[in-house]
Amino acid sequence: MICLGIEGTAHSIGVGIIRDMGGKCEVISNVIKIYHPEKGGIHPREAANHHANHIADLIRESVEKAQIDFTNIDLISFSNGPGLGPCLRTAATAARALSLSLKKPIMGVNHCVAHLEIGRGTLRDCMDPVLLYTSGANTQVIAFAEGRYRVFGETLDIGIGNCLDKFGRSVGLEFPSGPKIEKLASLGKEYFELPYSIKGMDIAFSGLLTAAENFYSNGEKLEDICYSIQETTFAALTEVTERAIAHTEKDEVLLGGGVAANKRLRDMVQTMAKERGASFFVPSKDLCIDNGAMIAWLGVLMYNSGIRMKVENSFIDQRFRTDMVDVSWRD
Ligand code: ATP
Ligand code: FE2
């Protein structure tokens, strides 16, 4: 089975094509266009216009790169939440149009669950992981328990990526600031104490963000502040992930989301996993960030488990929670 997936929950619009290899996923193309706001944060309407301008070309490009014909596609999948309303509607509209014109079934899928399933689908031996999902808007620790993907811990305010980007904006770094903060942090030497807030398995970043901004206003070196932000936030993320592993008694850790590109975060989580005797997995960067291939793969899993969706019922849900999904494709 070949599936084309469309991802458009936030600032990127992506189209991926995958082939089902009997339970494992072969990515045959995965193309993306990222909206960069001229200044400030994401404006949902502008991001949606950006997606609408690029989606037709991306669909064509994905089919060309996959070296297939439109008639080879068996299923159209799209992310139906959570995310920004105008962006979700744009991706859904493209998916519906494609489904109707190709006369192929449609499947709306949960974006967060897709981040986890692409790890299981593409990485050998990744079977039942605890996912640390760290992106711009989302920060969650997710694992399978009793028929659902449960959120064991999550941010109580902003996502870790947003925290990094907001700090970057307030000190004049370009968006997205995560990669720039990583570079600066590698030059940092002095550690500043920042608020470390964990409640059970939940986590909060806004107090730390304000404190870091204050260090900057007081003239401290940017490299040292970036270093302190990374050490503090990543230690907290690693701690909640470790708690979730202990609680669920699982022995695999998977990273996902754009912040998983960060070497320091990977190292910390990997060290923790090693110390607990757990396996550590991280997909290639193009499958960590928001991408169409992961949406296509989850569409296939759902379709193969017997789930069907009609175009007229292919709604979006901005607040579609991870644990609302009935995971019928796993035992
Ligand atoms: P979602 O809609 O799932 O919240 P997103 O739209 O934020 O995702 P992603 O591509 O998953 O998109 O993640 C983008 C985030 O990743 C940005 O906040 C960016 O600063 C951060 N990021 C990217 N590379 C790095 C890095 N090397 N270190 C830290 N953060 C990074
Ligand atoms: Fe995401």
Image (cartoon, rainbow, N blue to C red):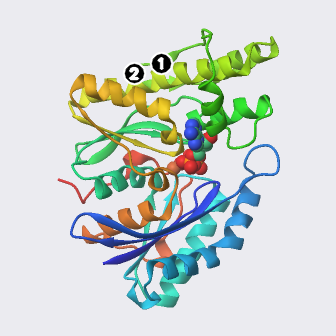
Q: Is 209 on the left-hand or right-hand side of 279?
A: right
Q: Nearer the viewer, mark 2 or mark 1?
A: 2
Q: Amino acid at mark 1?
A: Ile
**Residue at horizontal 59 percent and vertical 30 percent from the top:** 157
Q: Is residue 141 left or right of residue 180?
A: left
Residue type at mark 2: give it: Glu
Residue 11, label in figure:
none
Report whether the residue tagged 1 is closer than 8 Å to ligand 1: no
Q: Residue at x 47, y 21 (%)?
A: 236
Horizontal relation, residue 121 to residue 38: left or right: left
Quarter the N terminus occupies: bottom left
The residue positioned 52% from the left and 16% from the top of the image is 197
- The secondary structure type at the circle numbered 2 is helix
Residue 118 quadrant: bottom left
Q: Is label 2's Cβ within 8 Å of ligand 1?
A: no
Are there few (<14), some (14-19), or many (20+) residues within 10 Å of tag 1? some
Label 2 CA crowd tier, 10 Å (few <14, some 14–19, many 20+)? some
Disc 2 and disc 1 in contact, CB within 8 angstroms: yes
Decide: is 13 above or below 94. above
* Residue 219 x/y as whole percent: 81, 13
Count the labels in the image. 2
Secondary structure of residue under mark 1: strand
Res 74 visible: yes
Residue in front for this viewpoint, 74 or 108: 74
Q: Position of residue 19 (x, y in %)?
A: 33, 73
Q: Is residue 114 placed above or below 196 in the rendered structure?
A: below
156 and 176: which is toward the camera: 176
Give the residue pinned by disc 2. Answer: 239
**Residue lying at 45% horizontally and 55% vertically, measured from the top left:** 287
| x and y percentages locating residue 222 in the rendered image | 72, 21
Q: To which residue does mark 1 refer?
A: 198
Q: Earlier in the sequence, mark 2 or mark 1?
A: 1
